């Protein structure tokens, strides 16, 4: 479990740094100005089912995997 | 892609006012579907929040005055939270418990209520007495009443505009009795021309404004009033005195959402000739006011 | 006269208070950006994945082209709110796969064609398998945060995976920023089929995987939002392909890879809405690196164009490029000192281009989607120039249809 702790610490540190580095110079967008951002096509994954399928296809045909989520299992894809 | 868009115009009557929906779409069937959905949404809100209807949420709350607390749905809770905020931000001038004062005022008669009548009602008017712990509400005194009439029409305009967006309308506007929300500019990108009623001649515009987006609402002494000795007494009643507001004849405010515009204009009317325009200036939204003496000001136009 | 849009005024405290409260109303905000409870929905989709045939001339001793993989996938998703602060998502998947798959690679007997090794495909009967996957996720929503637990189970004739993940989302700075943290793990069992026919094949192996990720998304302006996340994964156990072989100086050996792998990804995603076009740009970039020497870059660009009548067309393009695993070779003239050997095209140096077109049509509370994708991989698209291309590189097309009902 020492390995896990190492990774968790890594990740928490990265987030902390990202948060710090982004603390400046971005104009505040008031809540009522966020109509465009709330549109469905502005979601990071507008179609979650398709996104899950697609990432599984790429994961099983390419050497790379991983992105903005954890979890999901492997497969015996050949 | 906007080459075949046609303008569709629907007029209907809802929430006690003439309303209109103007939208750009390709097909008549689509436009009728949108119009139907919009009118259903407005009717839904009217049914939920009209104090004239037996089955409305408001009637249920009012009937339970002096009894046990009532649990309300999330939408009603949102409106009550808003009422709380507006009450605080207006120093108690915008108060949804003040509707009951209207029972003392008969604007058709042209006669002032007896001072004793108002004195009997005033103890029942004060939002801070209401026990509001979302989602539970209790009106502690028998006779207390809530009235959402001061802002539910504006809320309905916003809800209708949002629904239009969800239904794929990107160009159009909705107008519920003068409370207007622009869904999007005309297909060529040009703004909507919106007139603001002249309080002394409500069929005419005193000024007009070009709006690309957002909403506009106005309040005035022209909706329901009586004149006594040449002085106008309107339906916007001050919850602290029980008497109509004074000094301003009309206020219009533009805002990203109509609910904000409507409450801001009502609060300004209640604040009166001096404090009203000053408060609007502080607020930070484009505004326009006309006083009963004919003077006007503001940065909206 | 105009409404003085040019002179942007400063919002007062009063205005912020009023607007904040107004935005809590469902009629005004609809689905907010923020963590909100999921609304009930049911989605079904069918996908048909089809690889191009393996041409005869790329194979050793084949008399005709060989049919590669075809996968039929059915997916069902159900989302439902549960009480006032929970929501539940269940994903079911059922897929059947059939076709031949690359088995091993032989050097070309023609010395003038040494840069073109030949593929041997798995037996004529090919592979037939089904995969069933279930994933359940429960989310608890708080004022400015949410926490989720998910549990998944996936099973094939020769493979079982149990996995679990925890995720937390926090909104900061008036919902201007969102931080996401997650950890997950999986425990997999591999029990290859036909071990009696192939004596070298392992009988039962296991592998585990632990991953953690962290992301930050930020509202940049009223039309732009960006998310950046990093993730680490550590895999342990049997990471080889039990069905594949490698040609090592004249003999065939089992595919053999290290029993540990550490993977790192950095993913940045941009969404920008263009009101004048009524369209949204999606731009994603992913950097990947692992301790097997694989490095990859992925760029995915999409344009979501709205048309009147609730119609959306989404063309997109994806470019992927990777370097090879350090122990990979199409074939080996001598065994490696570490005895690793793999000729899997997935570990070879290559790149891929894919084009997609999706259409979404909404009618009332229903949504219909059609999607099509063309994917082609080639060693010319690799990070560095490649002398010997793996003959097993794939080309596939994917057709997808789905229907959603919202409540």
Image (cartoon, rainbow, N blue to C red):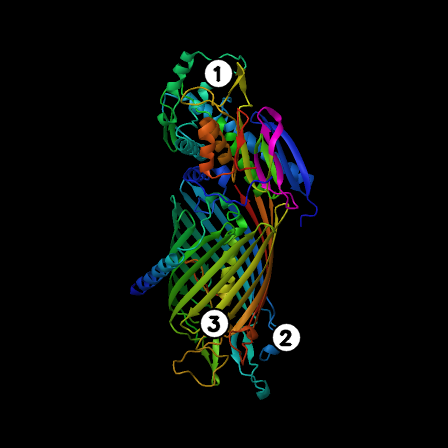
The residue where tag 3 is placed is: C243
Residue C230, can we see it?
A: yes
* CA distance separating discs 2 and 3: 23 Å
Residue position marked by numbered label 1 in the rendering:
B105
SS category of the residue bearing label 1: loop
Which stretch appears magenta? B180-207
Tell me the residue at 66%/35% (across/down).
B9
> Could you give the CA–CA distance between mark 1 and mark 2, rounded to whole angstroms?
95 Å
Question: What chain does mark 1 sit on?
Answer: B
x, y (%) of residue B175?
Answer: 59, 33
Figure check: A7 above or below B132? below
Pinpoint residue B244: horizontal percent, then vertical percent: 47, 21
Residue carrying label 2 = C64
| C341 shown above or below B179 | below
Camera-side residue of B30 and B233: B233
Q: Residue furthest bottom?
A: C111
Q: Are marks 1 and 3 in contact (CB under 8 Å)?
A: no
State which chain disc 3 sits on: C
């Amino acid at each position: 479990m020492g390995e896990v702790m190492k990774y968790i610490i890594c990740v928490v540190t990265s987030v902390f740094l990202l948060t710090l580095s982004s603390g400046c110079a971005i104009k505040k967008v008031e809540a009522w100005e966020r109509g465009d951002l709330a549109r469905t096509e502005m979601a990071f994954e507008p179609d979650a089912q398709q996104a899950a399928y697609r990432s599984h296809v790429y994961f099983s045909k390419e050497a790379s995997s991983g992105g903005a989520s954890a979890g999901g299992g492997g497969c015996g894809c050949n | 892609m906007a080459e075949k868009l046609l303008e569709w115009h629907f007029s209907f009557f809802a929430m006690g006012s003439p309303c209109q929906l103007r939208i750009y779409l390709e097909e008549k069937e689509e436009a009728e579907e949108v119009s139907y959905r919009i009118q259903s949404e407005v009717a839904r809100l009217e049914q939920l929040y009209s104090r004239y209807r037996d089955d409305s949420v408001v009637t249920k709350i009012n009937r339970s005055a002096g009894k046990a607390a009532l649990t309300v749905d999330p939408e009603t809770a949102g409106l009550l939270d808003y009422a709380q905020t507006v009450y605080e931000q207006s120093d108690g001038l915008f108060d949804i418990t003040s509707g009951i004062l209207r029972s003392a005022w008969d604007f058709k008669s042209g006669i002032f209520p007896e001072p004793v009548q108002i004195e009997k009602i005033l103890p029942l008017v004060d939002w801070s007495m209401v026990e509001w712990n979302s989602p539970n509400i209790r009106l502690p005194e028998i006779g207390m009443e809530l009235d959402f009439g001061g802002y539910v029409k504006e809320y309905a305009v916003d809800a209708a505009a949002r629904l239009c967006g969800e239904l794929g309308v990107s160009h159009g506007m909705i107008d519920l009795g003068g409370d207007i929300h622009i869904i999007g500019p005309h297909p060529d990108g040009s703004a909507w021309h919106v007139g603001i009623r002249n309080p002394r001649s409500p069929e005419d515009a005193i000024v007009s404004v070009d709006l690309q987006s957002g909403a506009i609402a106005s309040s005035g002494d022209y909706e329901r009033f009586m004149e006594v000795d040449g002085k106008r007494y309107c339906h916007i009643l001050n919850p602290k005195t029980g008497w109509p507001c004074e000094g301003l004849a009309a206020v219009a405010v533009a805002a990203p959402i109509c609910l904000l515009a409507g409450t801001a204009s009502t609060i300004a009317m209640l604040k009166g000739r001096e404090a009203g325009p000053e408060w609007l200036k502080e607020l930070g939204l484009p505004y326009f006011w006309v006083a009963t003496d004919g003077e006007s000001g503001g940065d909206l136009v | 006269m105009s409404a003085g849009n040019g002179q942007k005024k400063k919002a007062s405290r009063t205005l912020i208070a009023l607007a904040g409260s107004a935005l809590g109303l469902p009629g005004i905000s609809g689905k907010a950006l923020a963590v909100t409870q999921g609304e009930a929905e049911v989605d079904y989709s069918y996908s048909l994945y089809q690889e191009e045939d393996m041409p005869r001339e790329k194979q050793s001793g084949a008399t005709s082209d060989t049919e590669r993989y075809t996968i039929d996938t059915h997916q069902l998703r159900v989302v439902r709110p549960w009480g006032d602060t929970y929501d539940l998502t269940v994903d079911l998947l059922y897929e059947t796969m059939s076709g031949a798959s690359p088995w091993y690679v032989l050097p070309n007997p023609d010395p003038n064609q040494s840069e073109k090794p030949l593929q041997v495909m798995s037996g004529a009967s090919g592979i037939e398998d089904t995969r069933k996957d279930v994933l359940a996720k429960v989310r608890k929503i708080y004022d400015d945060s949410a926490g989720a637990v998910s549990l998944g189970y996936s099973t094939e004739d020769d493979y079982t995976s149990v996995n679990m993940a925890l995720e937390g989302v926090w909104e900061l700075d008036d919902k201007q920023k969102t931080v996401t943290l997650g950890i997950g793990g999986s425990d997999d069992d591999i029990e290859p089929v036909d071990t009696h026919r192939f004596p070298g094949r392992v009988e039962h192996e296991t592998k585990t995987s632990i991953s953690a990720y962290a992301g930050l998304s930020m509202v940049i302006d009223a039309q732009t939002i960006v998310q950046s996340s990093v993730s680490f994964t550590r895999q342990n156990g049997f990471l080889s392909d039990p069905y594949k072989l490698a040609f090592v100086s004249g003999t065939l050996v089992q595919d053999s890879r290290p029993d540990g792998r550490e993977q790192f990804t950095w993913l940045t995603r941009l969404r920008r809405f263009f009101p004048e076009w009524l369209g949204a740009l999606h731009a994603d970039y992913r950097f990947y690196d692992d301790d097997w020497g694989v490095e990859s870059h992925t760029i995915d660009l999409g344009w979501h164009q709205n048309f009147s009548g609730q119609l959306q067309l989404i063309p997109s393009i994806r470019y992927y490029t990777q370097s090879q695993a350090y122990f990979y070779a199409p074939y080996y003239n001598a065994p490696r000192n570490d005895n690793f050997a793999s000729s899997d095209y997935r570990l070879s140096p290559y790149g891929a281009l894919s084009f997609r077109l999706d259409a979404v049509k909404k009618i009332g509370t229903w949504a219909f989607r059609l999607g099509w994708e063309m994917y082609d991989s080639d060693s010319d698209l690799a990070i560095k120039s490649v002398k010997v291309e793996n003959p097993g590189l794939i080309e596939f097309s994917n057709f997808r249809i789905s229907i959603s009902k919202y409540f």
